Image (spheres, helix red, strand yellow):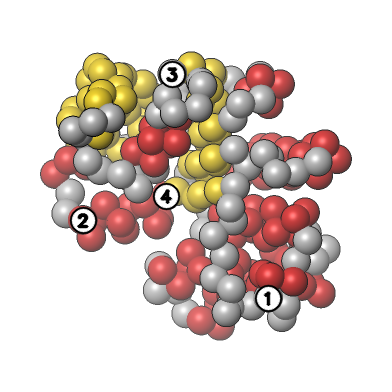
Amino acid sequence: MSTSIIKLQNIYKSYPPHHGLVFSDLSLEIAQGDTLAIMGASGRGKTTLLNLMGLLDTDYQGCYYLFGKNINNFSEKETANFRNQYFGFIFQNFLFVNHLTVLDNIALPLFYQKVALKLARQRAAALLERFELSELSERYPTTLSGGQKQRVTIMRAMIHHPKLLFLDEPTSALDETSQNKFLELLFEYKKESGCGLVLVTHNSTIAQLCQHQIVI
């Protein structure tokens, strides 16, 4: 039986006073290695749900269990520590730190975990070598192509071996060739690592690559 990573029970989420209720009595569970696509029309709360599941948004009613622990009882610092340890994120706008090199951008999750600088950079360099992109090591994000940025984003998300990767419309700005390459790399990493994926997408073809789909 697969280990439950996230279990949401009876979640209510609203944006008062004018935007109203986003979720009502929402319950779902993500087990180790699961893949979930979140679909729905614009403005229906797809990204809100992803942020809530990824512990980026903790303003809700209901119960959130992470590895069986009710995170409602966690402090803000404890929640951040769990997020940094277990989750990785890939957003459509990349969210690079432009004054840091590509190497240090990839290593950022390890810096947050207080991993020694030398070791963090060694692990980032190993990923660049694996992706055959070592020549990008000392470059800066603003000099990269769209496809290179996507690959760097994947490396940054996977460097600390997360249990779950959260992706918000990760292929929306890519052409078909770059999209297919990105998905190939993503699912190859998922197969190797056993991590789960939670993916927001408008693309039904991409959604069908996932084991589970929900529409909100």
Query: Disc 4, disc 2: CB below 8 Å?
Result: no
Question: How many numbered marks appear?
Answer: 4
Q: Nearer the viewer, mark 4 or mark 1?
A: 1
Q: Position of residue 59 (x, y in %)?
A: 22, 41
Q: Position of residue 87 (x, y in %)?
A: 44, 48
Q: Relative to the observer, which residue lies in front, 159 or 140? A: 140
Sequence order check, earlier mark of 4 and 2: 2
Q: Relative to the observer, which residue lies in front, 3 or 47? A: 47
Query: Disc 3, disc 4: CB below 8 Å?
Result: no
Q: Position of residue 17 (x, y in %)?
A: 18, 33
- Provide the secondary structure element on which disc 1 rests: loop
Q: Quadrant of residue 190?
A: top right
Residue that numbered label 4 is attached to: 86
- Provide the secondary structure element on which disc 3 rests: loop
Amino acid type, callout 2: Glu
Residue that numbered label 3 is attached to: 216
Q: Relative to the observer, which residue lies in front, 21 or 96? A: 21
Which disc number belongs to residue 140?
1
Q: Answer left or right for 61 relative to 23.
A: left
From the viewer's perspective, is residue 205 above or below residue 33? above
Q: Answer left or right for 43 relative to 122.
A: left
Q: Nearer the viewer, mark 3 or mark 2?
A: 3
Label 3 – label 2 distance at C-alpha: 28 Å
